[in-house]
Image (cartoon, rainbow, N blue to C red):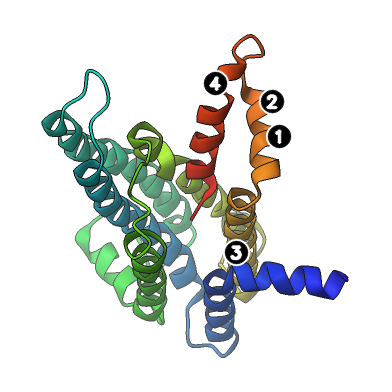
Amino acid sequence: MKYDFFKNKLQNNPSIIANALFLIALVLIGKVDPMAIVFAYVFETIIIGLVHVVKLFYIIRNNKPGKRESKVGNFLLIPFFIIHYGIFVAIQSIFLYTAFAINDDRFSTSLSFSNFVEIFHLEGFKLVALSILATHVASLYFSFLKTKKYENQNLGAYMIKPYLRIFMQQFLAIIPFLFLFFTNAVGLTAAILLIIMRTILDYYLTTIAKDSKKIKALAIRIMDQNKPEELPKIEATLKVFFEE
């Protein structure tokens, strides 16, 4: 019974598990610098933003604007998202980069262009970044475009959807940072731990999104008890937040 339970769970999230195993294998055989894993996950925040812009475009194009809204006004939300999300990611990324650069002689804390070149040439960085990019592009096509998931979507919920995942992902980057206090380097253990924790996060969020009972239970906790009519809207918004 337990075996079947875990088997079904793994089958529902094959891309997440496959990508994690691929990254762990690369680290174990020495094809990837542990720091490349950290910076690749930081780079992933940019990929998520770009993919999300595509999703917003399809949602706006294929859904009628709500009351007091217009197509033009909704499309103008896309550059607003790009600017706001860009600032959000830049601040977090600069903080993380500076924190790691302090204890790594390969980088300076000046944020000069040469440092970005150095990151790009870290062993395995391009391979890891491409695998992450491929995963997101595949998910965009098969889970969003091909299924026409953009139809009848809540634009407001999708506007703020990436922030929860990005905040939690950047928070996980603290894990390898803690290793710097003891070893002065982000080693193999820290990189693998980051991959595992990140995979658990993705797995947990997508599992919640597919569990209507958990979504409803959480929505009831959030809902104003004097406004039960808001429950369906809260459930729909939470599902958007948690899904891949």
Q: Residue at x 40, y 82 (%)?
A: 123
Residue type beneath disc 3? Thr
Q: Residue at x 57, y 90 (%)?
A: 29
Which of pointers 3 and 1 lies earlier in the amino acid sequence? Answer: 3
Query: What element does badge 3 sit on?
Result: helix
Q: Which residue is mark 2?
A: 221
Nearer-the-camera pick, 64 or 170: 64
Q: Nearer the viewer, mark 3 or mark 2?
A: 2
Which of pointers 4 and 1 lies earlier in the amino acid sequence? Answer: 1
Looking at this rendering, what residue extends furthest in the right direction?
1
Q: Which residue is mark 4?
A: 230
Task: Say if 170 sits above or below 130 in the image.
Answer: above
Q: Which residue is mark 1?
A: 217
Q: Dot 1, crowdedness within 10 Å: few (<14), some or many (≥20)?
A: few
Query: What element does badge 2 sit on?
Result: helix
Q: Nearer the viewer, mark 4 or mark 2?
A: 4
Nearer-the-camera pick, 141 or 132: 141
Q: Nearer the viewer, mark 4 or mark 3?
A: 4
Residue 232 image point, x, y percent = 55, 30
Nearer-the-camera pick, 193 or 99: 193
Which of pointers 3 and 2 lies earlier in the amino acid sequence? Answer: 3
